[in-house]
Image (cartoon, grey):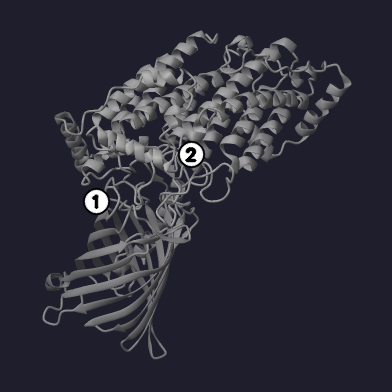
Amino acid sequence: MLPSSAQTDVDAIMMTKNNFCGGLMYTSSKWDYYWEGTLHRNNQNLGTVSSQMIGIMGNYGLKDNLNILFSLPYITTKASAGTLAGQKGIQDFSLMVKWLPIEKKLWKGTFSLYALGGFSAPASNYVADFLPLSIGLRSTNATGRLMVDYQVKNLFVTASAAYALRSNVTIDRTAYYTTEMHYTNKVWMPNTVNYNIRAGYRSSRLIAEGVADIWQTNGGFDITRNNMPFPSNQMNAKRIGANIKYTVPKIEQLSIIANAMFTVAGRNVGQTTSISAGVFYIIDFNKKKSETTDKK
Amino acid sequence: MKIINNYITTFTISILFLSSCKQSLDDRSKAYTSLNPTNIDLNAGDWKPVLLTAPNEFPLAAPMPTTNPAYLRELNEIKGYQQNITPAQQAIINYWSAGAVLRWNEIMRELVAKHNLPPYQNDDGTYPIPTAANPFSYPQFPFANPPYAARAYAYVSVAQYDALVAAYFYKRQYSRVAPYKVDAAIKPLVPTSDLAAYPSEDATVYAVTVEMLKLLFPADVAYIQQKADEHKLYRIIAGMNTRSDMDAGESLGRAVATKVIARAANDNMGKAVGTPAQWAALESTTAATGETPWISLENPRRPPMLPFFSRVRPFLFDSLTTIAIRPPAPPSVNSDQFKKELAEVKSFADNCTRDQKAIVAFWADGVGTYTPPGHWNAIAADDFTGLNFSEVRWARNLALLNMSLMDAGITCWDTKYAYFNPRPSQMDPSIKTNTGVPNFPAYISGHSTFSGAAATVLSYINPTKANDYNEMAKQASISRIYGALHYRSDCEVGLTQGKKVGDFAVARGKTDGAN
């Protein structure tokens, strides 16, 4: 149950000032193998664990080089075997500021540096301590990300690294065992690191890119043999995938996104395959303003 | 740029705020203060032991007088430690001064949680059975499931209680005072009392407990022994006992353990797993009555959990009484009553509220936890710390509680396997559960039986909280309907049956001489 990442957190795209891009994203993901610690196994009492996510996402240009991003997903989960009940609910609201302090010509292309910072927090009182079917982990996170992008003509590469501070979470029981007993309903959550690299073709019409992504939890413990997972497990995942964004020719405000990701290695997570599709629409608030305040 | 500065400031403040959220977890067990009994129970040597024929069944030699040069040389060890107490030693003192019985009860709960894991299946779909003969290979011994845990808590509590009754008997007989009373240069680092120091009650507790835990958790002996070594060090550094006080307590504790272990070796636990033929007979016997026999809901199907735990010898009554007090059969699967109860479970499965889910999780005590008996030990321990009991009264109260929990487990298992009825999800696979389904029949609910017994015993020990205990027991019981694991009959009859067992413990408590 890794955080669902809004595409715009990790891409080198900015909305111009007073433009708002909003849309809906749908993700379907599933796994039947998972890593119990480092042991790769399946579980006939879970069968295939699947989740469906519908997220509202938006990106507003405060300035040409300063955007504000938000997302709010609704998630349902289900296990195809066994008796455990699937869960559903609104997961975490996230708000992020994306800043482009440097953009300049370098050799034959353009080099850009981005800094992102933001928050996410549970937007409903969902249950964290019901893994692997919980819809999220309930921690409030503060994330900082640095991203560099280099583009030559229509070819680009983007690399970024993020660090997330995660708050303690509160669960419904007042004692639990990790590698020792704890007599509290609070769970200490290790912080996480994310590395993301993407490269491919980028034009105003089409973006087609390959993606490699590493999630790493700095601390936490392994699921012991045949035990249940727990929110403060060390959850790591290496994923690869591809992503396409296409802007519809006749309606330039409209773009569609398709994405597929596959987990190639992990620890205390499911070996998830996910596919996503999204529709986004850009509203330009400049037009109305330009009639009244024509500064340029 | 100003916006950016503001943004950076906000982000920094937020990180500081989040960091502050991550500090200490307010662990209850770390907040316990030093044991300081209001009544030191000087005459506990007269209390009635559970298994010992008399408090002095095992002899203990008289100590050397405190004027003996050998004794005086022992004092130098304490003085040596007290010259320079390291932070690590101070942490050991702080931890153990909360109480010997309390801390060993906590250690046990931790061992239960660590070992409460059902073994993974073999390639052929059968399941391996943990064995004490080979505790380190997978599956590790034990699988500390609720019956195993209930019995383990009971044996350790009984052993501690009997050993302490013996220790208090000899304390009064020999009246050797604590080292800090002999030599003013020795500072008592924890609350003092007029209780004699020989034999050390702390040494008695850890020695008897280590012996019991070697039997019950053989893969953890190294960890257990390390805890005992720290416990011993604490008493000496704290100026409360000399090494000869400790040695005497250890020998007494070990002697008592031999008697308790002899009982455990012959209480029928070894036969509780049963055989494939016996498991098949449970199914066919029930089918012959026209009822639907229980089937494991695990994939692959796991043999039922300890079906012959019912035949384990109880502490508070005999095995014939186990059968005599067995509740009548649950509603037939063909009855309207059954259909009504199944429909109720289905409605909770489909419409469980967030608050109800919290109640389910709070009382679930499933895989990887200290089990429902452990939960009631934790509740008892939290409350007892505020009641300032002496070590021997702690042991007596936990022995009453844990004997009732073990015997509740026995009568509950007897009932479950007498009727061998199906879980709601077996009768209606569309019923999904809010926690794992235990791998044994439904009637009567284990959580309800354990909780009924525990609430009854705790209400007797701590009457000012009787209402709270009874409300907790009701909540634990109904949590199993919310979780879609049990029918209402399972829970209601279980709670009543548990109270019945609790009454046996209360009757013992009224006549054990501790009042």
Residue B497: x, y in percent? Answer: 34, 21
Q: Nearer the viewer, mark 2 or mark 1?
A: 2
Q: Is residue B362 left or right of residue B252?
A: left
Q: Chain of mark 1?
A: A
Residue B292: x, y in percent? Answer: 24, 37
Q: Chain of mark 2?
A: B
Residue A101, quarter of the rendered image: bottom left
Residue B242: x, y in percent? Answer: 76, 25
Q: Which mark is residue B46?
A: none
Disc 2 to disc 1: CB gap under 8 Å:
no
- Residue position for label 1: A88
Residue B107, quarter of the rendered image: top right
Residue B282's place in the image compared with B324, above or below, is below
Q: Which mark is residue B144?
A: 2
Q: Is residue B267 left or right of residue A12?
A: right
Q: Residues within 10 Å of mark 1 (few under 14, many from 20)?
A: some
In this view of the protein, which residue sits in the foreground, B419 or A231?
B419
Q: Amino acid at mark 2?
A: Ala
Q: Quadrant of the N terminus of chain B?
A: bottom left
Residue A276: x, y in percent? Answer: 25, 68
